[in-house]
Image (tube, rainbow, N blue to C red):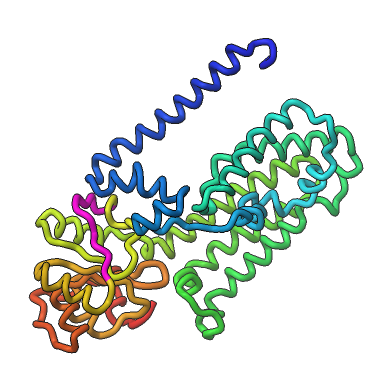
Amino acid sequence: WAGQHRARWYGRGALAVLLGAALLLAWALPAGFAGGAAYRQALFFTQTAGRVVDKVAQAADLQNHAQPFWWYLPALPLLLFPFSGWPRMWVALATLRRPLEPGLRFALSWLLPVFVTFSLIGGKQLYYPLPEFGGAALLMAAAIALLRERRPALADNGWLGTWPLAVAGIGFALFLFLLPMLVASHRLHGYWPEAAAPSSRYFSVVFLLLGGLLLLRGRGELRRLAVAGLIGALTLNTLFTVTLWPRYDLRPSAQLLHDADRRNQSIGYLGDYAGQFHFAGRLRHPIISLTEGKNLQDFAQAHPNGLIVAHPDRLDAEDLRYALLVQPFRSTWVVIWPATALADLRAGHTPPEPAQPTQVYPSDDWRHRMQP
């Protein structure tokens, strides 16, 4: 069809590109104007260019997630999971032979050039190749269809079924069931298991059922795998939302910084600032990256009503006594200080008692917990 209707083929392709750009701009333009000048500059230039060109990232002091060329290759099994754990899919891909059908050539022409381009770009994150998953699904589905057509013995071989994923699902269900005991006996540490343990047994039932589903044989194997993958992903996302999301929710800190920014208070960040507060807090002014020592003291002297955001691994009594706000963030903490109070403590002096007690989020027992 494409060869007979070239104008329509390329015209619709160009239209698809324009529509994709319009969708992107429909989000980016309002976000840029809502986030302020500093966020707009980061969004449209420094953050984007810094992902591609290391010198831009270094000049703008950006964390551009630079990784080597081959970084995506060992990540492919994770990116393609659960299909990467299905032996029949790998056999189907391995048995493809030239000449390839037009649909397969289309999928490969979609995947390979873009994958190479993503690999050449310095900044890499696991979710950057997400737009390519559609092409990967087309390729795998076509390979399975050809395997069934040309090699029925391999298509029906039980050893190539979804049983490895079933075993993994049942094993993960057992792990979730035992997680509260492992945490209570101090055999497993860390903020992930500690946060997930109170609810993990409820979710273990889902993975046990999914493991049983994947043990079934016969027709519908691909559909069962797709359904299990969707339900499994939704279950993991729900487990994360229920147990771990408070450690990723920066709204309390962003709101405090928003209020300070509107009062034209200068804000410093002790360490490398990665832009995590600007959009959430709708900040209009830049946050200044600071270092310990003279740089911090100079900032406090120049901006006596300013704030400093610190990012300690552990809390101490001074954090809970003199800081404005304390909240967990991932495996560490976000602590927002009056600049002069932090400068006094770093200089070995005792700051004045704050007018208001430290805000601690979440507002349950975190005040009395000294480490995440």
Closer-to-camera residue (22/52):
52
Q: Position of residue 297 (x, y in %)?
A: 18, 76
Task: Name the quadrant of the N terminus.
Answer: top right
Q: Position of residue 317 (x, y in %)?
A: 25, 85
Relative to 324, is 73 on the left or the right? right
Q: Position of residue 129 (x, y in %)?
A: 56, 45
- Is residue 295 something one can see in this rendering? yes
Q: Residue at x 24, y 42 (%)?
A: 34
* Above or below for 110 versus 186: above
Q: Quadrant of residue 99?
A: top right
- Farthest residue in the right direction? 153
Closer-to-camera residue (276/38):
38
Q: Position of residue 4 (x, y in %)?
A: 68, 10
Q: Residue at x 14, y 59 (%)?
A: 260
The residue segment tinted magenta is: 280-290
Asked if the magenta segment contains residue 284, the reply would be yes
Q: Residue at x 78, y 39 (%)?
A: 144
Q: Quadrant of residue 181?
A: bottom right
Q: Quadrant of residue 67?
A: bottom right
